[in-house]
Amino acid sequence: MIDVLSRIPVDALRVFETAARLLSFTRAAEALGMSQAAVSWRIRDLEQRLDRPLFVRGVRQVSLTPEGARLATASIEAMTLLRRAVADVVEADQGVLAITTLQTLATQWLATRLGAFQLANPDLAVRVDTSPTLSMLGADGLDVALRFGSGQWAGLESRFLMPAVFTPVCTPAMRDRLDLKTPVDLKRAHLVGEPREWAAWFAAAEVSPADTAPSPRLTADNQAMEVAAALGDQGVALGSPILYAREIERGLLVRPFDQTVALAEGYWICYPPARRLTPKIARFRDWLLDTARDDPAVVAGARLAGREVGEVGA
């Protein structure tokens, strides 16, 4: 069966429904943001496609023909249902903020601060996704991403959140057991972490390769697992003094040495440029960047990395 709607532009039905509901081409034009001539043309085109008049045109007013009244009843009901459905979808979308982020950043920094955002934004529910899959945002229902890298991702706008900095961390017992007084003393330690990062740290600490410890015996695909090994008194790991500020403050971890290294990459908040002014995204972005600026560890790390919180990715 041929769909009779296939030969009728949906926009023409929208114009007709507005004019039929208001019984005025002039008021319909104002409601739709169109000229009166455009409204008249759309309705005339619809009448020609249906091969019958829908309005009786008077000097100062219009009225519906019997066919027009029948179509008006159905179109007004249909448009009302459609408006209600669209409003429900938009309101549901605006009521939930979906964030995709890295597991370590989520558990060590974001999760302990999200409560403040929700208290300030009680109309928003927050959903956090820590899947390692790189989302392009939008298509999978995710709104913003917290990513690690250079700040350049095709199709996304990015703002700098915090630097990636690292320094040796271990338990107080491990520090005392190894008698860690100078960086060279780490040659006695069981190192945990990426070899290239340890090499960078030893170079920054001016330790010659001959005086460094053997290659790390344990590496993981995320910092949380590596620092967890240090917390378990299994060795000395490279950890972020930003992400593990609480553990350091509570004395669960110590920094045997002040030397800290900043990577060229960092953490960024990303979103599609077309959605930068979407209220829920704008509110979260501004809150997140302000929160980072109020974190002394972030500020110190950004200064070390030569970055500024909130700067736009190149």
Image (cartoon, rainbow, N blue to C red):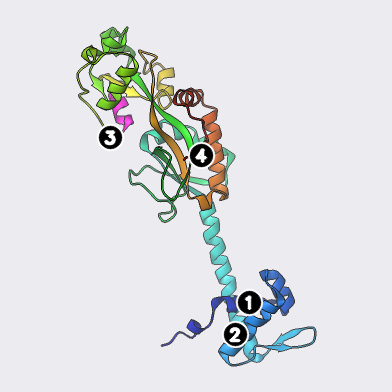
Decide which of tag 1 and tag 3 comes sooner along the chain: 1
The answer to whether residue 223 is magenta is yes
Q: Quadrant of residue 173?
A: top left
Closer mark to the observer between disc 4 and disc 2 = 4
Q: Are marks 2 and 1 in contact (CB under 8 Å)?
A: yes
Residue 119 position within the rendered picture, expressed as x and y whole percent measured from the top left: 56, 38
**Is 244 placed left or right of 113 in the picture?**
left
Residue drawn at 19 percent across, 18 percent down:
214
Q: CA distance from mark 1 to mark 3?
A: 57 Å
Front in this rendered view, residue 248 or 293 = 293
Which residue has dot 2 on it?
46
Q: Quadrant of residue 287?
A: top right
Q: Amino acid at mark 1?
A: Val
Report the number of discs. 4
Q: Quadrant of residue 206?
A: top left
Which residue has dot 3 on it?
221
Q: Amino acid at mark 4?
A: Val
Neighbours of disc 1 within 10 Å: few (<14), some (14-19), many (20+)? many
Decide which of tag 3 and tag 2 comes sooner along the chain: 2
Magenta stretch in the rendered image: 221-229
